[in-house]
Image: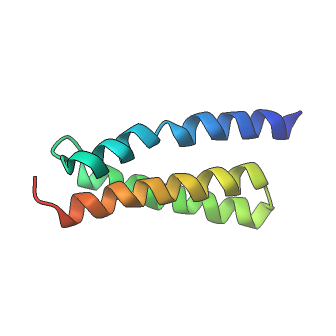
Amino acid sequence: MADLVGYLSAFLTTFAFVPQALHSWKTRDLSGVSLPMYSLFSLGVFGWLIYGIMIVSWPIIVANSVTLMLACVVLYLKITHKD
């Protein structure tokens, strides 16, 4: 039951980033995206991923792998495109 709650929570929090990533990708408008916030957030998600690997928790590993990928897309676009 704990893994089910973990996977459901991971799905909801991870896919909350999909609209931002898609919007950023399509419009290249990142004027409302904070570079320091996304940098710190990405670093924190990377930390959660490492933690998940260390304790072998698949909900944490899967969720943070996907979240890190989405956050890095937005971060990459913010760094490489002018507002």
In the image shown, does 52 or 78 lie closer to the viewer?
Answer: 78
* Residue 20 picture location, percent across and down: 36, 41
In the image shown, does 50 or 15 lie closer to the viewer?
Answer: 15
Query: Which residue is most to the left?
Result: 83
Q: Residue at x 37, y 47 (%)?
A: 21
- 2 above or below 31? above
* Residue 80 picture location, percent across and down: 20, 66
Q: Is residue 66 left or right of residue 26?
A: right
* Residue 26 picture location, percent across and down: 27, 48
Q: Residue at x 22, y 64 (%)?
A: 79
Q: Is residue 1 left or right of residue 5?
A: right
* Residue 1 picture location, percent across and down: 89, 33
- 23 above or below 58? above
Query: Which residue is most to the right?
Result: 1
Q: Residue at x 68, y 54 (%)?
A: 62
Quadrant for residue 2, please give it: top right
Q: Residue at x 37, y 45 (%)?
A: 22
In the image shown, does 74 or 28 lie closer to the viewer?
Answer: 28
Q: Is residue 76 left or right of residue 47?
A: left
In the image shown, does 47 or 63 lie closer to the viewer?
Answer: 63
- Total of numbered circles in the picture? 0
Colour treatment of the image: rainbow
